[in-house]
Image (spheres, grey):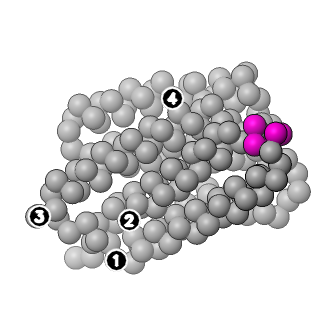
Amino acid sequence: LLVNIIAESYGIFTDEADYWIYNISTIIDFAFYYYVYHHSIEPESIRKFIRWFTLLYFPFSFVNIFFIQGFNVFHSYSFLIGAIFLILVSAIYLRQIIMNIETQNPFKDRLFWITTGVLFFYIGTFFHLGLFQYIEMQHPSLDYVFKQLLNILNVVLYCMYIIAFNVGNKQ
């Protein structure tokens, strides 16, 4: 969360091309989420799959950022792959929660709220950030609309974080 606040604040308060900070912050975000879901999803086979994906994803991301797309360009290739996997793992976690609904109230589970926010955010940003360079170059008028959508999705994500911190797992 702190990494996101720093990255978003930097992006708001500077006029510089700040793609490099988003490249770094999204990789840190993915690492955090993969770690959390790795420890929260029960079947060992899925946890093993998360470990293997993570071991392959991060080297690919760094190669992409430094040698394919470049450090000063948003890393849409690795973002798309990371977002697809995060959406998949989030859906698996929600399925696990739904399957245990008789024994566990999802509305009191912090990770349920975080996962809900993550799903809204990454499904919503998938096309915008995945096609970022294309939209920015070919359809600049759409870029403004997508940036406003991104702001709304950020609000939804942070509201889900706030709910998670306030209602979850109180003993």
Q: Earlier in the sequence, mark 2 or mark 4?
A: 4
Q: Which residue is mark 2?
A: 113
Secondary element type, mark 2: helix
C-alpha distance separating marks 1 and 3? 18 Å
Q: Earlier in the sequence, mark 1 or mark 3?
A: 3
C-alpha distance separating marks 3 and 4? 35 Å
157 sits left or right of 19 in the view: left
Q: Which residue is mark 4?
A: 57
Residue 36: image tag: none
Q: Which residue is mark 1?
A: 167
C-alpha distance separating marks 2 and 3? 18 Å
2 sits left or right of 171 in the view: right
Q: Earlier in the sequence, mark 2 or mark 3?
A: 3
Task: Name the residue: 51% across, 50% down.
Answer: 123
Q: Which residues are magenta?
A: 134-138
Q: Position of residue 21 (x, y in %)?
A: 72, 47
Q: How many numbered marks appear?
A: 4
